[in-house]
Amino acid sequence: MEFIKTPIEGLIVIEPKIWKDSRGHFFETYNEEIFKRNGINEHFVQDNQSLSSRGSLRGLHAQGGLNAQGKLVRVIKGSVLDVAVDIRTNSATFGQSFQLELSESNAKMLWIPVGFLHGFVSLENDTIFTYKVTGRYDKDNEYGVRYDDPTFRITWPLEGKELIVSEKDLQLPLFQDTENPF
């Protein structure tokens, strides 16, 4: 695996080594020892998976408190534009976002530490997205900000009627109207 640092401290793109032959391919998606050697020394407690139609936008979400979540994310089928926003109060890159296409074909993963908002938009029908997280789901410590918050100036690849956003996500506040848990 190759671990590629991004311009935002702590946010890491992971490119697995893929072995291909006449049967198909094989690659590791997680190896605790290799991750620790590359600065990701986390204990993962839960795996989550979503299925999304083209245009489905999920985010921007985070979880604080005792069950604050770091996330290792990847796509099993299809593709997404994945977005992480640094909201760590004392970070030199506070407010900056990072975008990356994650897809079945590129097999890239993204490590998103605690203190980031996260969201994605599905670029294909039947996209399967997985999250390996460091904190169990905790409804009382959910945190979210509108996907189109002007504070972060995120350019999503689909707009208007092409986007499918849940009512819950449409009701999220703007960042300036929240109490940042990080």
Image (tube, grey):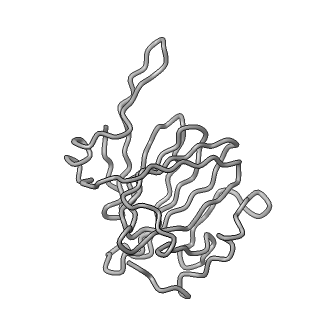
Residue 107, above or below 145: above
Residue 172, above or below 24: below
Q: Quadrant of residue 158?
A: bottom right
**Residue farthest to the right, as pictured:** 161
Q: Position of residue 44 (x, y in %)?
A: 34, 52
Residue 14, above or below 178: above
Q: Quadrant of residue 32?
A: top left
**Residue farthest to the left, as pictured:** 37
> Where the C terminus falls, by quadrant?
bottom left
Foreground of the two, 156 or 176: 176
Residue drawn 61% across the image and 69% down it:
147
Residue drawn 44% across the image and 75% down it:
95
Residue drawn 37% across the image and 66% down it:
114
Q: How many marks?
A: 0
Foreground of the two, 147 or 64: 64
Question: On the rendered structure, is 170 left or right of 12?
Answer: right
> Where the N terminus falls, by quadrant?
top left
Foreground of the two, 118 or 70: 70
**Residue farthest to the top, as pictured:** 22
Q: Quadrant of residue 166?
A: bottom right
Q: Position of residue 118 (x, y in %)?
A: 50, 63
Residue drawn 31% across the image and 46% down it:
3
Question: On the rendered structure, is 153 left or right of 164?
Answer: left
Q: Position of residue 104 (x, y in %)?
A: 54, 36
Q: Position of residue 152 (x, y in %)?
A: 53, 74
